[in-house]
Image (cartoon, rainbow, N blue to C red):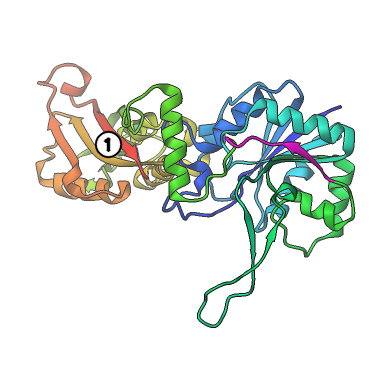
Amino acid sequence: MHVAAIVAAGGKGQRLGGEVPKQFLQLGDGRIMLLRSLETIGRSALVQEVVVAIPADWHGRALLENPGPKPLTFVEGGSRRQDSVANALAAVSDRADLIVIHDAARPFVTTALIERTIRAAERHGAAVAAVPVSDTVKQAAEPGGDGSRLVRATLPRETIFLAQTPQAFRRDLLTRVLIEAPDVAVTDEAMLFERAGLPVHLVEGDPQNIKITTADDLAAARARVRGERGDGPSSAMIRIGSGYDLHRLVAGRRLILAGVDIPFERGLEGHSDADVVCHAVTDAILGAAAAGDIGRLFPDTDPAWKDADSVQLLRRAMDVVRTAGYVVTNVDVTVIADRPKLAPHVERMRANLAAALGIDAGSVSIKGKTNEQVGEIGRGEAMACHAVVLLRCSV
Ligand code: MG
């Protein structure tokens, strides 16, 4: 048996996180929701490879580096869940004969549940994790004219189960039911099997394997993560980052600092516009989110970033940080240069940084500092910048 896991994280539902789909929100331990499922899947000896469906415009891939030892492939999510699954299935290796599908909105899945589901599908062809209900289950009639509803019947609750993921299927059967039902909207893959008249076996699910749908679910999930860590309520909700950059000052280049074109006889040398302030701030925010650094996001070997506007690079980095579930609280910048004087330009620089970071200028500090004519900076051969930033959880 060769098992491929498909993680459905292609949804764009932004109800909980403002601009960020819920599967990319922080649970308060410095990791995004999706990463938790990937790490759990990574711990199963039964799974040999993982394919993740993510939205096409999601910038946070750096947040998922090294979630485990298994090969990890990303594909674009589709408009419907089954489209995402079909895209992922196309990226699964030929060797896989069993597919286990998991929803990234269920971050508390356990390796035991994944393996239970895989074993059942190996035996029966199709298996879904599901939990029994303890409440009495009422079926409602159509709403009346005033919107009120009447009970039509009480369903025998011993026959009612709530489906979860993981759901696991023989690959040939899953491929078949996806092809057979191109126009049927389903809320899980098991429905495609039921529609095709194929048996689907229930596996004992896990009541802790909740789906994060509402703000209350998210709050409960974060409380649980804090409990696991033994933390107080706030320790992982703020993050600090520092950034540093230096560029040579040379003749024949423009001097651009925080996006402001500053009149001076020399400018900073570099592959991009060499905006030392934007570069330091970019590294500070990426560092605070543990999302890599400017060199990894915008390598200077890539012609795309030649003469790039570094304010735009900062905006892109800010997209990554938002995706990680953070917003900026404040930033403090120190520019080290003996000349030119920065004071006449500081207000415009602050406004540019504030706009790129999505905060008020009152939360952006820029200070100039001379190097007392000491060393390369003191001799006017280079300019350097330090930045410190504080992030907080966006929800
Ligand atoms: Mg630089």
Q: Quadrant of residue 383?
A: top left
Depth check: give the residue in front, 388 or 227.
Answer: 227
* Residue for badge 1: 277
Q: How many marks?
A: 1
**Which residue corresponds to the image point at 55% horizontal and 31% vertical from the top-left?**
36
x and y, in percent, of residue 326 in the image: 37, 40
Q: Quadrant of residue 192?
A: bottom right
In the image, farthest residue toward the bottom: 145
* Residue 75 seen: yes
Left or right: residue 34 versus residue 122 is: left
x and y, in percent, of residue 239 in the image: 33, 30
Q: Is mark 1 within 8 Å of ligand 1?
A: no
In the image, farthest residue toward the top: 375
x and y, in percent, of residue 90 in the image: 79, 44
Please rate how many residues cluster around mark 1, counting C-alpha atoms within 10 Å: few if below 14, some from 14 to 19, many from 20. many
| Residue 202 magenta-highlighted | yes
* Residue 324 seen: no
Quadrant containing ligand 1: top left
The secondary structure type at the circle numbered 1 is: helix
Q: Amino acid at mark 1?
A: Val
Q: Quadrant of the C terminus?
A: top left
Depth check: give the residue in front, 23 or 389.
Answer: 23
Left or right: residue 238 versus residue 179 is: left
Per the rendered image, the range of residues in magenta is 200-208
**Which residue corresponds to the image point at 59% horizontal and 49% vertical from the top-left?**
55
